[in-house]
Amino acid sequence: MTRHAATPGQSKHSAAHRLELLLFRLDNQQLFGINILKVKEIIACPHLTQIPQASPVVRGVAELRDRAIPIIDLTMAIGRRGIEQHADLTRYKVIIAEFNRHTRGFLVSAVERIIVKQWQDILPPPRGAGNSYITGVIRQDDALIQILDVERILGESSPGNEETVSNAHIEPELKARLGNRLVLVVDDSAIARTQTTRTLDDTGIPYFVARDGRQALDIIEATAADCATLSERIPLVLSDIEMPEMDGYQLTREIRSNPHCGGVYVLLHTSLDGEVNAELARQAGANKTLTKFVPELLADEVLNGLRTVLAH
């Protein structure tokens, strides 16, 4: 599968608002979606080798171009009844995805098509929906498409990823300059928020949390209206990129367009990798982009950002 850049005549600004979703099914009814930027390829399920003591959702590993890639039963991973152990897996498809510096295969019933939407079209899951594996929903042709929290699925299928912590720590001089200021953490994934805040706790950096870009902007605008400059209260915004209603690119643009937000450091922390995303972040006005999730790198980047702001 080939990933698409902006077409000729299409600005990077408009490309940042676009979301291409690969649609697939885990059964014969419900449609799910995953950001196409996470997808490397789609293949028929290959031969799988069992892994001793692996998570039950990992059906085995596939050898692809000299790489051993874990294959996750995506139906079981989101809490539903998984594919039968003796099922003919050659009837299924595998979505090879790359995110958070990992490569995983997702075993699905069928792959449908790619659709193009705007980030503001993505809505948060309905309250009380009871499925914490869903980060957003969207309607397409009278069908409700659910966007999966692949970061949570990765964390639960590879528990060791959650255990790593940062050994970095804020130095006393920086802590004193920080005073009562707080870092604003913005992420729609519950497990990503937990990973991020654990790192900040380990590092000794105070923070508060917003669950998406829209909520973060409301906090920022209310705070900025109550002080001379936002950096007096929020010196650094640490935000995900992929979020319903308002993504990290748009949140950054809103911050940069607000005259009361001068001096705020914006660090975009994303499961996406690659120069395209880094360039879109620069175009939006972000100071730095970092691919999830390495606690030491995150701690270092947040500390560097705070030093930059508080040095003035």
Image (cartoon, rainbow, N blue to C red):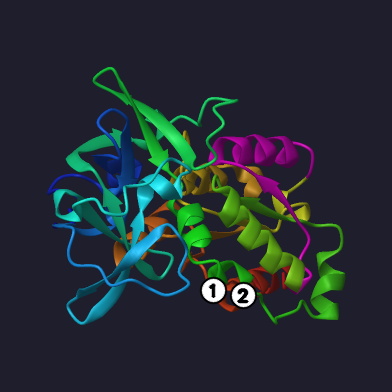
**Residue at image location 33% in from the left, 46% down from the top:** 34
Drawn side of residue 292 relative to residue 91, left or right = right
Q: CA distance from mark 1 to mark 2?
A: 8 Å
Residue shown at 29%/34% (left/top)?
A: 117
* Front in this rendered view, residue 305 or 33: 33
In the figure, 162 relative to 218: above or below? below
**Compared to 4, does 227 lie above or below?**
above
State yes or no: residue 104 in magenta.
no
Residue 165 percent location from the top left of the image: 66, 75
Q: Position of residue 145 (x, y in %)?
A: 34, 30
Residue 142 visible from this viewpoint: yes
Question: Circle 2 sits in a helix, a strand or a loop, which is it?
Answer: loop
Front one among 260 and 271: 271
Q: Tell me, yes or no, whether the highlighted magenta stretch contains residue 221.
A: yes
Q: Secondary structure at mark 1?
A: loop
Name the one closer to the observer, 267 or 210.
210
Q: Which residue is at 28% across, 42% downward?
A: 21
| Mark closer to the observer (1, 2) | 2
Q: Between residue 75 and residue 40, name the one nearer to us.
A: 75
Give the label on residue 294, or none: 1
The amino acid type of the residue labelled 2 equals: Thr
Q: Is the residue under label 2 in contact with that under label 1 (CB below 8 Å)?
A: yes
Q: What's drawn in magenta, residue-wise?
A: 203-227
Q: In percent of the image, x 81 and y 66: which residue is there?
A: 178
Sooner in the amino-acid sequence: mark 1 or mark 2: 2
- Measured as percent of width and height from the top left, residue 87 is found at 24, 50
302 to the left or right of 26: right
Label 1 Cα crowd, 10 Å radius (few <14 / some 14-19 / many 20+): some
Kindly identify the amino acid type of the residue bearing the numbered disc 1.
Val
Q: Does any portion of residue 269 appear in the rendered image?
A: no
**Residue highlighted by disc 2:** 164
